[in-house]
Amino acid sequence: MLLLTRTPEAWHRLSQLKATALPGILGGKALHLRCRLWSRQGSAETGRQSQPQGPGLQTRLLITALFGAGLGGAWLAVRAEKEQRRQQRRTEALRQAAVGQGDFSLMDHQGQARCKADFQGQWVLMYFGFTHCPDICPDELEKLVQVVQQLEAEPGLPPVQPIFITVDPERDDVAAMARYVQDFHPRLLGLTGSAEQVAQVSRSYRVYYSAGPKDEDQDYIVDHSIAIYLLNPDGLFTDYYSRARSTKQIADSVRGHMAAFRSVLH
Amino acid sequence: MAAPSMKERQVCWGARDEYWKCLDENTEDASQCKNLRRSFEASCPQQWIKYFDKRRDYLKFKEKFEAGQFQPSKPTTQA
């Protein structure tokens, strides 16, 4: 297009070339006729006699522009439809994952049965650890709770549910969890269960844990992966935060996810 | 055995920090810090003592490594 508008003379020569080369080809006659029609129309519009054989420059530009716009429009429409289909497939996949992924069946620190669906519609920050943990778990839980406190102090933000899941079901029964969580936050929910239930939820969230050897007091340390998980109100795993992330970094990230969130369930 | 409460944890961490500070000041000479070691052992579960001892070793090594003072043992020339 740009080239054609810049060099009308070249275009003119080209159209002459076409007109002489084409007659042999099928439909060439019709093209000739149309050309002549255009040329008459064109010269009548512009009132010039210098280009009797081709259509006027403006007309040619118009036709080219229309044709180009038509092609462009068609391409855009096809692309938009493709993108829409891709988005639909993605939403469907996410919806399935939201319902099935990371489900669990555990007991909270008040003895009430809990599964993942109970937290639908809420943002969840989740940490795996154990109550006999010497330093890392309390530090990480403290950090998690500070994030929750920061966010709940900001008006207009949805509340975040803090959850602590034990990887030491042997010692961390409902009573032990109740004693432990009360030190951190009034809304912190402690979840425990049978060895199988804990193994299942840990597998779902790719959490590794391994109890160390017992000493004479039957005490032991549980080695485990350290990460804070963020679930969105659809129950989808949204982000995770390693130990190196500060309270502020996590709070900023959660805020960003909240602003960008669109539910796939409705 | 119940897990230490938050208060008990803080007492334990405090005793640990005092003992570690003493070791820092006395270039790791534990004989200079016997009283603080006893208080540390009295304030924390036995399992935690073992854990914190190992953790200090690790942190010291990390410090040295990051300062570029760590020299890896020379590989033996024998096949």
Image: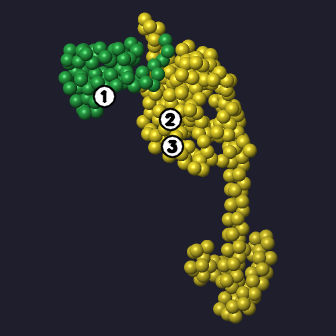
Chain colours: A yellow, B green
Circle 3 residue = A150
Say above or below: A247 vs B52.
Answer: below
Q: Residue furthest top?
A: A216
| Circle 3 chain | A
Question: Mark 2 Cα within 10 Å, few/some/many (few <14, many 20+)?
Answer: many
Nearer the observer, disc 3 or disc 2?
3
Question: For residue B69, what is the image quadrant?
Answer: top left
The alpha-carbon separation of the residues under discs 1 and 3 comes to 33 Å
- Whether the residues at callouts 1 and 2 have beta carbons within 8 Å, the answer is no
Quadrant of the image for the C terminus of chain B? top left
Nearer the observer, disc 1 or disc 2?
2
- Whether the residues at callouts 3 and 2 have beta carbons within 8 Å, the answer is no
Residue A103 coordinates in the image, percent (x, y): 66, 28
Residue A65 left/right relative to A183: right
| Circle 1 chain | B
Question: Mark 1 Cα within 10 Å, few/some/many (few <14, many 20+)?
Answer: few
Q: Amino acid at mark 1?
A: Lys
Circle 2 residue = A144
Badge 1 and badge 2 in a common chain: no
Q: Secondary structure at mark 3?
A: helix
| Circle 2 chain | A
| Of residues B30 and A260, the one drawn nearer to the viewer in this rendering | B30
- Whether the residues at callouts 1 and 3 have beta carbons within 8 Å, the answer is no
Badge 3 and badge 2 in a common chain: yes
Q: Amino acid at mark 3?
A: Gln
Marks 3 and 2, the one that precedes in the sequence: 2
Which residue is depicted at the point 22% across and 21% down? B28
Say above or below: A256 vs B61.
Answer: below
Badge 1 and badge 3 in a common chain: no
Q: Taking the image as drawn, is residue A103 in sight?
A: yes
- Rendered image: mark on residue A37: none
Figure label count: 3
